[in-house]
Amino acid sequence: MEIECGTGVSFEGEENVCVYDSSAWAERGFCKKCGTHLFYRFKKTGHHGVPVGLFDDDENLVFAHQVFVDEKPSFYAFSNDTHDMTGPELIARYQKS
């Protein structure tokens, strides 16, 4: 799970961040030392998704949005209602300049 963090994202120890060109529209950031996944970033807009596990205070987070629902296995379901987006819908939303 990731948190939508917009474009103003920075990391302490940025010299240890490695970026992998994962698709035509996005890239992923990892720690060079331990391999931890740090972010998913849309190339065109710079919009970041950051894994929820990187945040110390997660008590007030609300799981309200699922993406790539068109690619999920049929047995994969959550009990709460969420705003669902297919992969093409997500890409169209965050690739706008």
Image (spheres, rainbow, N blue to C red):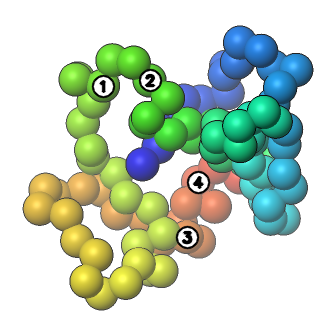
Mark earlier in primary sequence (1, 3) = 1
Residue 79: x %, y % from top left: 11, 62
Q: Quadrant of residue 31?
A: top right
Residue 39 seen:
no
What is the spatial separation of the Cα atoms under label 4 and label 1, in whole angstroms?
A: 26 Å
What is the spatial separation of the Cα atoms under label 4 and label 2, in whole angstroms?
A: 25 Å
**How many circles with numbers are drawn on the protein?**
4
Mark earlier in primary sequence (4, 2) = 2
Residue carrying label 4: 93
Which mark is nearer the camera, 1 or 3?
1
Q: Amino acid at mark 1?
A: Asp
Which quadrant holds the C terminus? Answer: top right
Residue at screen point 37% across, 58% down: 66
SS under mark 1: loop
Q: Residues within 10 Å of mark 4 (few under 14, many from 20)?
A: few
Residue carrying label 3: 87
Disc ID at residue 55 = 2
Disc ID at residue 58 = 1
Q: Amino acid at mark 4?
A: Arg
Name the residue furthest front. 34
